[in-house]
Image (cartoon, helix red, strand yellow):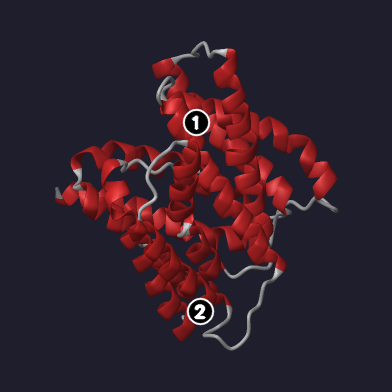
Amino acid sequence: MLKTYLWLTFCVTVWGSNFVFGKILVNDFSPAALTSLRLLFIVFFLMIFILPRHGLRKISPRDWVWILLLGVVGVFINQWSFFEGLVTADSTTSALILATAPILTGVLAAVFLKEKFTSRMLLGSIIAIIGIYFVVSEGGAALHLERGLLWIVITMVSFAILIIITRILSQRISPVITTLYSNVIGLIVSLPVVFVMDNPVTLSGNWQGWGLLIVTAIVVHGIATLVWNHHIRYADASKASILSNLEPFVAMVMGVLLLQKPITVPEMTGSLFIVGGVIFATWQRRKRNRHMPHY
């Protein structure tokens, strides 16, 4: 069991670090180009890992509609808005906003999947929103709704949509196949967008930038996800749920180490409200559904 939780902690550390690495990468790459390149390396990894084991699967026309929607919204828009947001948004604040995705997922599940939205989830949502306000307003001093944070909200919404569509498709298609096909679609959609949205298209001029791009694409969206899905089967649901909510704290620590960004009192206080609210709201639901996809 210790080995299992060490591997799960590794995954959470990787996902939490992604916010800081993304902040570094947008200094060397323009957002749409970064999105397209990252998806390219993710698809290469997934094809090498998945095709020899699972092969290509026939998909019904109805499910192709869902996969197309997943590829455009849950993969492309999710990745693109993430990097667009990090151009100006703070990495820690971004991590805290994205930490509320399970709550929005609960709302969408209640609307589209007819799952029950309980008073416990409502109270947890209110607590988390108070935490977000505390962080964004820097302790209540002034509310700053900058453009980057709006992009991060879009990232959070698209991630919640990703989870809902993945649940719908998981009843008929292996999540591994869904992941591969949706990422291929996301890559195809991203290619023309590079030349439309990036003006100019910027690429890193040094090997360190390219190395960080390739390694984070493969480790964050490939290896870590596979490791999590393998070891989550042997972990206690409640403990794994708590671990997955530690990503914002990892982002804070990595921000200090790599960006020399100090942790402020409003960030720490707000993060306790946000993470506490999310855990309180989703405790029962996440005990039933431990597999949270990460892209």
Where residue 278 appears, x then y in whole percent? 38, 61
Q: Residue at x 53, y 75 (%)?
A: 133
Q: How far, Cα to Cα, is label 2 from label 1?
A: 35 Å
Left or right? Give the position of 145 relative to 243.
Answer: right
Q: Secondary structure at mark 2?
A: helix
Label 2 sits on what residue type? Phe
Foreground pick, 174 / 228: 174
Note whether residue 287 is visible.
yes
Find numbered disc 1 in the image and state the secondary structure of the residue it sits on.
Answer: helix
Residue marked by disc 1 = 179
Going from the N terminus, do you reach mark 2 or mark 1 first? 2
Residue, far left: 1
Can the viewer see residue 25 in this picture? no
Q: Residue at x 51, y 79 (%)?
A: 134
Figure quadrant of residue 170: top left
Relative to 159, is 140 above or below?
Answer: below
Residue at image coords 57%, 51%: 157
Residue farthest toward the top in the current orientation of the protein? 58
Q: Where residue 218 sits: x, y (%)? A: 49, 41
Question: Given the current orientation, which residue lies at the most extreme bottom position?
Answer: 141
**Residue 84, relative to residue 237: is it above or below?**
below
Q: Which residue is mark 2?
A: 134
Residue type at tag 1: Thr
